[in-house]
Image (spheres, helix red, strand yellow):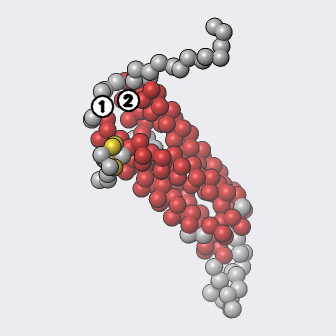
Amino acid sequence: MGPTQINGIPAHPLLVHLVVVLVPLTALALVACALWPPVMRRFGLALPALALVSMIAVPLTTHAGEWLEEHVKENALLERHTEMGDELLPWAVGLFIVATALWWTYRRATAPSAAGTNGQVGVSGKPGMPLRIAAVVLSLVVAAGAVVQVYRIGDSGAKATWKAAVFTPPVDRNSNA
């Protein structure tokens, strides 16, 4: 499905950075575009494009993680991290769907009307208030869910990596204890 190794090292730790940056960035852009139409006007098609790249990065990273899981010592923390990683794709799909719907709705609302001439904006020029409120609420829910899930997965991955390894915390040489 995607790369499992890059230059001979596991791809998962490298690809995970795409997800950790792109999913929260997409969530932030989605909420900003839903709240402020001028932001949506500037983003335009870039919003669903960003959401699409984020959504594609999730299964690529998950696939590389599943490959890595088969090549490391099994433990409960790793198993939990793997299970949580599988739960991010629905949130990424949600980001993509809401971003695309928001872009499409904004585009339709600001498109020239059939009766208009010289590129005049249609009757309203912007989506109605109930639709805007629904878009903001839906964007907030999907964005918060995606960001929280990224955080939870990252936290579990760090614990699986560092608690499973033999790790001795550094000694604080400045303390008198």
Q: Is residue 140 visible?
A: yes
Disc 1: CA contacts within 10 A as few (<14), some (14-19) or many (>=20): few
* Above or below: residue 44 compared with residue 164: below
Q: Which image quadrant: the C terminus?
A: top right
Local SS, label 2? helix
Residue at the image point whose x is 65% and y is 66% from the top = 40
> Which amino acid lies under the numbered mark 2 shown in the image of this protein?
Leu
Residue 5, horizontal then vertical, whole percent: 31, 47
- On residue 81, the disc is none
Q: Which mark is residue 78?
A: 2
Q: CA distance from mark 2 to mark 1?
A: 9 Å
Q: Position of residue 33 (x, y in %)?
A: 65, 61
Q: Residue at x 46, y 59 (%)?
A: 53
Q: Nearer the viewer, mark 2 or mark 1?
A: 1
Q: Secondary structure at mark 1?
A: loop
Please, which residue is most extreme toward the left here? 70
Q: Nearer the viewer, residue 168 or 165?
A: 168
Q: Is residue 158 above or below residue 44?
A: above
- Verify CB contact (< 8 Å) between mark 2 and mark 1: yes
Residue 112 position within the rendered picture, expressed as x and y whole percent measured from the top left: 65, 83
Quarter assignment of residue 122: bottom right
Say which quarter of the image contains residue 73: top left
Q: Nearer the viewer, residue 3 or 9?
A: 9
- Out of 156 and 93, give the one closest to the viewer: 156
Q: Residue furthest front?
A: 173
Q: Which residue is mark 1?
A: 72
- Give percent across and percent down for residue 9: 33, 43
